[in-house]
């Protein structure tokens, strides 16, 4: 019960942060990726702030989770990771959404975001089916 409430609280905080920073608007994302046109550095500021908060949290939590954090970095970089990252990047650049902001926007009633979330779910399911079939 407590873990579920903590997860809900973190998700709500994340969603509110996305809304307040304007990161649910695809124009901010596409503007950030437009280096030769109308560059918008707003996403960079959000990323720097997020990295700072994360770094502080890691420093505070380090004594409690040093072994689990260290083992997470030992995972190999494989073809599935590279293909997934490439698909994510292309989708992010074309649509201006990544999963978090898309879910927040879809929850706010934005139809383009709802379509993106639906396509994302279908893509995840298709990928799971394809990789499960290939690994047998």
Image (spheres, rainbow, N blue to C red):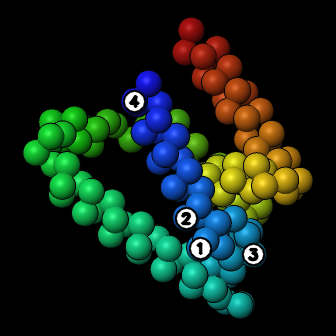
Q: Secondary structure at mark 2?
A: helix
Q: CA distance from mark 4 to mark 3?
A: 37 Å
* Res 70 → quadrant: top left
Q: Is residue 131 left or right of residue 47?
A: right
Q: CA distance from mark 1 to mark 2?
A: 6 Å
Cβ atoms under marks 1 and 3 closer than 8 Å: no
Mark 4 or mark 2: which is in front? 4
How far across and how far down the image is residue 17, in percent?
A: 55, 64
Q: Earlier in the sequence, mark 4 or mark 2?
A: 4
Q: Earlier in the sequence, mark 1 or mark 3?
A: 1
Q: Is residue 64 left or right of residue 101?
A: left
Q: CA distance from mark 4 to mark 1?
A: 28 Å
Cβ atoms under marks 4 and 2 closer than 8 Å: no
Q: Which residue is mark 1?
A: 21
Q: Is residue 24 left or right of residue 85?
A: right
Tell me which residue sits at (80%, 41%) in the image: 119
Point out the image quarter for the C terminus. top right
Q: Which residue is mark 3?
A: 27
Cβ atoms under marks 4 and 3 closer than 8 Å: no
Point out the image quarter for the N terminus. top left
**The label number, if any, that marks residue 17 in the structure image:** 2
Q: Which residue is mark 4?
A: 2
Q: Earlier in the sequence, mark 4 or mark 3?
A: 4
Cβ atoms under marks 4 and 1 closer than 8 Å: no
How far across and how far down the image is residue 18, in percent?
A: 60, 64
Mark 2 or mark 3: which is in front? 2
Q: Earlier in the sequence, mark 4 or mark 1?
A: 4
Mark 4 or mark 3: which is in front? 4
Q: Residues within 10 Å of mark 2 (few under 14, many from 20)?
A: some
Cβ atoms under marks 1 and 2 closer than 8 Å: yes
Q: Residues within 10 Å of mark 4 (few under 14, many from 20)?
A: few
Q: Secondary structure at mark 4?
A: helix
């Amino acid at each position: 019960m407590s873990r579920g409430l903590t997860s809900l609280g973190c998700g709500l905080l994340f969603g509110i942060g996305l809304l307040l920073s304007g990161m649910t608007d695809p124009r901010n994302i596409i503007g950030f990726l437009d280096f030769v046109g109308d560059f918008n550095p707003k996403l960079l500021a959000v990323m720097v702030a997020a990295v700072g908060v994360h770094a502080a949290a890691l420093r505070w939590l380090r004594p409690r989770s040093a072994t689990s954090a260290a083992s997470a970095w030992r995972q190999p970089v494989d073809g599935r990771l590279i293909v997934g990252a490439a698909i994510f990047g292309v989708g992010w650049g074309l649509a201006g959404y990544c999963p978090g902001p898309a879910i927040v926007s879809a929850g706010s009633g934005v139809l383009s975001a709802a379509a993106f979330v639906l396509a994302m779910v279908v893509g995840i399911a298709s990928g799971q089916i394809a990789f499960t079939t290939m690994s047998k």
